[in-house]
Amino acid sequence: MSDRSPWRCAAIALLAFPGALRAQEVSADTLHVLRIGDEDVRELIGHVLLTQDATRVRCERALEHLRTGVFQLFGNVVVTDDTLTLRAPRGTYDRPRRLAEVFDRVELEQEGTTLHAGYGEYFAEERRAFFHTRVVVVDSSSVVRADTLEYWRLTRRSRARGRVVVESPADRLTIYGGLLDHDPERLYSRMTLDPLMVQVDSSAPGSFDTLQVRGRVLEAYRDSTHRLIARDSVRLVRADLAARGRYACYFTAADSIVLRQSPVLWYRETQVSGDSIDVRLERRKVRALVVDGNALAVSRSDSLHPGLFDQLTGDRLRMLFGAGGLDRTDVEGRAVSLYHLYDDTLANGLNKTSGDRIVIRFSRGRAERIAVYGGVEGQYFPENMVRAHEAEYALPNFVWRTDRPRLERTAPFPADH
């Protein structure tokens, strides 16, 4: 038998280290020294503990490759570094690089946050972790699913990539996208790469109201305001409400929406535009619209005449809604009203009115009473002049948009992928 035989090396090791082994940064119940190919390997069995600075690695069995300083870890692998704990059935630890690599049912825990994945790496020197394959992160307020996730332990910042889904049960929100940056210190998250937010609210048994928001960027703030901001190519849809623009802010707790940067909003058969639009809701129902700057409201005049549009413009526009729809419209500053008249169901000309302020009260969707204040001017155009020439009588800033957003019926990918 050669002196280099693994059996002889193991016997010498057992004689040299009776009982529990304590060798500098490594300890175990039993040590065997093996020769595998041209490499010397130490096999550690039972209560294996590897310590390197603040990092501790535990497992049931390990193979230490002496030339490279890499440990193969088997059975209940646990890596700890201060408040971070990483668990898996098997893994490796590269002592020169201070890199722990874990496989299969990977679990990370730190200060109320739990992560599960199929694979993980922890770089102890950088205090950084990386995970892929069915990544799921759970904390007190949300669940995040992704293809990959990178995590910085000291700041607790994370970056998720791939098919990212964020679920917030308290707000009934789900956000989809391709890249998520999360900063818990700022209570801030940023989703990019075709993001979509979906909020489903059961307002009554058997009924659901869904809000969808798209933009190039979605930002969520979970501070005292609880708001979601969409930027660039914004599309917002909920029941009878839809909007487009370059900026939208949805206050989830206050249940209100702020639209800026050339917004256009549709509510039922009314289209509204201006420099800014504020939407005030009550129990998910629109109760008021406030439009500031270049305000314009356009609505189909009558269902039997879909090509005719009533128009209202001014510096500031307020629309109040009740259970039956639009109750009142109040426009101030260079106010102009253009609306069609009817004799029963037959079109009967056009009325154009201007003044400092116009107040219109509605009944069953039609103007019932109009009051004009300050600098009043009015014109009536008979039907024989208007018919087939409606565009010539339109207000200067009139446009009827046909790009109203619609609800997307399917999610980009399953929430439980």
Image (tube, rainbow, N blue to C red):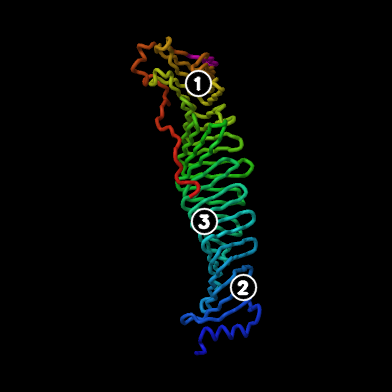
| Residue at (63, 76) in percent of width and height | 29
Where residue 147 appears, as percent x and y from the top left, is 48, 54
Q: Residues within 10 Å of mark 3 (few under 14, many from 20)?
A: many
Residue 399 appears in which quarter of the rendering?
A: top left
Is residue 336 within the magenta segment? no
User: What is the three-letter code of the residue carrying label 3?
Assistant: Leu
- Please give left or right for residue 238 compared with residue 307 in the image: right
User: What is the three-letter code of the residue carrying label 2?
Assistant: Gly
Q: Residues within 10 Å of mark 2 (few under 14, many from 20)?
A: some
Find the distance from the CA under tag 2 to the CA under tag 1.
85 Å
Q: Nearer the viewer, mark 3 or mark 1?
A: 3
The kind of secondary structure the magenta stretch mainly shows is strand
Find the distance from the CA under tag 3 to the CA under tag 2.
33 Å
Q: Nearer the viewer, mark 3 or mark 2?
A: 2
Mark 2 / mark 1, whichever is N-terminal: 2
Marks 2/1 in contact by CB < 8 Å: the verdict is: no
Q: SS class of the residue under badge 2?
A: strand
Q: SS class of the residue under badge 3?
A: strand
**Residue that mark 2 sits on:** 46
Mark 3 / mark 2, whichever is N-terminal: 2
The span picked out in magenta is: 370-377
**Residue that mark 1 sits on:** 335
Mark 3 / mark 1, whichever is N-terminal: 3
Where residue 221 appears, as percent x and y from the top left, is 58, 44
| Residue at (59, 30) in percent of width and height | 283
User: What is the three-letter code of the residue carrying label 1?
Assistant: Ala
Find the distance from the CA under tag 3 to the CA under tag 1.
55 Å
Where residue 178 appears, as percent x and y from the top left, is 46, 50
Q: Nearer the viewer, mark 2 or mark 1?
A: 2
**Residue that mark 3 sits on:** 149
Question: Residue placed farthest to the top in the image?
Answer: 343
